Image (cartoon, rainbow, N blue to C red):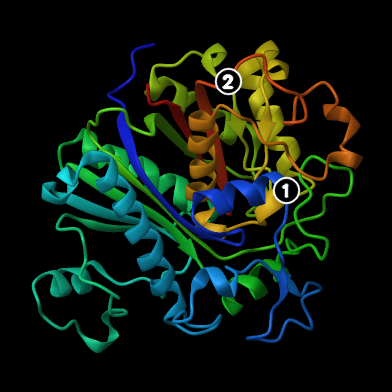
Amino acid sequence: MNGRAAVAVTGLGVLSPGGAGVDALWRACGSGDVAFRTVGHFDVSRTGARLAGFVPDEAAGPGAPPPGDPARLPYLVHRATREALADAEARTGGAGRRARTALVLGSTDSGGCPSAAAWRAWRDGRSPDPGAGWSPYAPPAWDGPVIQVGNASAAGAAALGVGADLLRGGVADRVLVCGVDTVTETAFQGLASLRTLSPGGCRPFTTRRSGIRISECAAALVLERTADAPLARLRGWGSSNEASQAARPDFEGVAKAVRRALEDAGARPTELDYVNAHAAGTRHGDVAELRALEEVLGGHLPRIPVVSSKAALGHCQGAAGTVEAIVTVLTLMRGEVLPTLGLADRDPRWDHLNLGDKRPDRPPRTALTISCGLGGSNVAVVFSRGD
């Protein structure tokens, strides 16, 4: 295979239910030490679920708007993007400040993100229209296009693909990709109406899996055309849109996205040595995803770890694709595979697979992360080590 040019990942920033920063995220994914809290800013008494994941108060900081405040989403965006940009500029000696920079936001909350017109107004020193969105907490650090991607739970992963294509097409020299969502009444009640929420939380790959628990998160990655010694390289991505039911991914659609990502990356299936799966812990979704991986990877699949981060973090909605991409990048950087938590009652049909509970033969060098959204939106992204 001959893939298109890879792009460099140069900075990371995240606020998750595990805390602020990548080290807190890594600890949470390894230990499951996340305190899910009762939703108190709207009535959940008729949903059958009451808990959600929130950025801890001490991590959000004393100035953070509380859950339910319209300013909470922009606050989380600002914190995560500022951290990612600072991380990138520390690694590149500040060279990125002179680059044409675009912003791509992945979110399910179309009302909570500002319009491109609002960003242009702030960039030019003008006040946007009152209904155009929220005011930023600092002047925007981008002067290129501002794009919002709304592919449901696959939004964050699709935003990474859009960002990579902006770089490949020469539209920008640097792209800041941020997946973000808060816990809103619209999302909570909507998922409850689809019978997707589980009082027991996300239990991927287990016999007790029965649905998801949603979380808030803001996770940002800085992508650049080239960089010396990047954190990792985004080699390719692929997407599809296939589902026979709105809330059920079809294995054919997931398989198409994975094949397209591998082709875009110029990677053979046997090059993969780590998969961060969507694996939200739904009865049908986990089956469809693992069937898709078996379809594409065949006999290679049992040799590599397939891990779910949602067992620890919950489902971060539109930010799931970006926060799980960060976990994937950290796995490549650190050469360590964290397990899927809660596998004491794993589904026996997958006993032949390594669900992160077996040490791999070697540190991963090429990885795949998958996201699936309502309506059949499937996205897969291929990363490799930065060396």
Task: Tell me what residue is drawn at x 30 percent, y 38 percent.
Answer: 164
Task: Tell me what residue is drawn at x 73 percent, y 61 percent.
Answer: 196
Quadrant in which the N terminus appears: top left
Q: Residues within 10 Å of mark 1 (few under 14, many from 20)?
A: few
Confirm whether residue 375 shows in the render.
no
Q: Give above or below for 355 relative to 132.
A: above
Q: Position of residue 275 (x, y in %)?
A: 60, 30
Label 1 residue SS: helix
Q: Position of residue 311 (x, y in %)?
A: 72, 49
Confirm whether residue 40 shows in the render.
yes
Task: Tell me what residue is drawn at x 49 percent, y 43 percent.
Answer: 326
Residue 31's disc is 1
Task: Tell me what residue is drawn at x 26 percent, y 80 percent.
Answer: 132
Is residue 37 shown left or right of residue 92? right
Quadrant of the rendered image containing residue 137: bottom left
Q: Circles 2 and 1: CB distance less than 8 Å? A: no
Q: Position of residue 336 (x, y in %)?
A: 61, 29
Observer-nearest of 248 and 289: 289
Is residue 22 shown left or right of residue 231? right
Residue position for label 2: 363
Quadrant in which the C terminus appears: top left
Q: Position of residue 248 (x, y in %)?
A: 68, 48
Three-letter amino acid code of the residue under disc 1: Ser
Observer-nearest of 121 and 12: 12
- What is the distance, in whole Å, between disc 2 and disc 1 at their CAs? 20 Å
